[in-house]
Image (tube, rainbow, N blue to C red):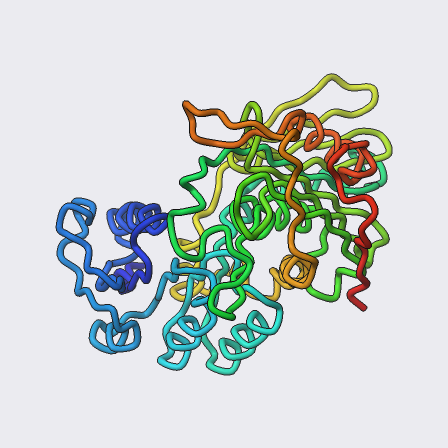
Amino acid sequence: MTTAPVPVVLAGARGHGRWHLDNIRRLQDRGLVRLVGICELTPLTPREIPDGLGAPEQSADFGALLDATAARIAVICTPIPTHTDLALTAAERGVHLLLEKPPAPSYAQYRRMADGVARAGVACQVGFQSLGSHALPAIRDMLADGVIGEVEGVGGAGAWARAEAYFRRAPWAGRRRLDGTDVVDGVLTNPLAHAVATALALDGSVRAEDVTGIETELLRANAIESDDTSCVRITTARGRRVVVAATLCAEQPDEPYVLVHGSRGRITFWYKQDRVLLQRAGHGPEEFEYGRTDLLANLVEHLTHGAGLLVPPDATGAFMKVVERIRLAPDPAPLPAGAWHLLPEEGRRVVRGVDGLVAAAADTLALYSELGAPWAPSALPREVSTR
């Protein structure tokens, strides 16, 4: 059975959009898609378009571009505050969606997007690429088989580094709001959002109603509005805790991971590498590596052969509850000057001891303040019920 390549428009082709350009080229080489349009305020030059993609039509008018190209799929990789309106522009035309994470800057905008997509009857895949890892069903099978006993909680750790210039890459970068519009570009909601979404997925708590309480500690070492060193503890309807700690100010940046705690062992999942370490009582450590299903390829397979979507909007409801809690939280507290130092050769700020704190939070399911971090806002109210 042969199927014609699905015509695709990409909105937002610079920055992270370059990854999507390369991915579309890879899938175009496989005969799955065909890039027919690029939406950018300033058109891409021929040198910016990867070889093999030809000369797709370009326009700053997203709706007009969809109409002119008869696109069947739109990939949206634009600033966070634009996601909902662009998604609805596509949905109103019957165009299916791959929508970058976070899907929206607020829960209300997320619901507006998800409800509009549902009314239009189009498919929408949210771009949490880690949820396409084949490690997830493998870990779920291990948990169902009781390999590590009763699941007691899930931790997540992300120790990354970003230069000060990272927060100047776009007007919305490092902002909680811009011109009265929510942005919520924090460490847990954007660069390390995968850690939060993956931890919730491994707990089996992905829908909005699966979350019953959220505690946050939001801080910043950089001169920004949003947070760059934070942790969150989510209480789920299963009665378990999901704790994710993250920073963009690591001393020694490393691969982020999610850690499932069991009564007789633990499973560590390095989600960018699709690598799993199983440690359990009475056995030596076992390592596994898995493949991954690309989310755009899965969307094409859904449209052409009826495959189930891996990350539909409803599967990000719990994550969006976390985004909403962070949006409504007090503005992140600046770390005292003595808590961080500048690495001039790298142009980035480093928080002393934060790598160990991030790992300890994932290991113990404790917040920074409970781990004795001298700069944690232990006196501030942290918990909000989502009931």
- Residue lying at the far top in this picture: please name it: 284
**90 or 328, which is in the foreground?**
328
Q: Quadrant of the C terminus?
A: bottom right
- Image position of 123 (left or right of 363): left
Residue 6 in percent (x, y) is at 29, 63
**327 or 60, which is in the foreground?**
327
Residue 330 in percent (x, y) is at 69, 58
Residue 80 in percent (x, y) is at 47, 61
- Image position of 224 (left or right of 57): right
Q: Residue at x 53, y 63 (%)?
A: 177
- Image position of 93 (left or right of 241): left
**51 or 142, which is in the foreground?**
51
Q: Residue at x 51, y 70 (%)?
A: 180
Q: Quadrant of the N terminus?
A: bottom left
Q: Image quarter for residue 250?
A: top right
Residue 37 in percent (x, y) is at 23, 64
Above or below, 157 relative to 223: above
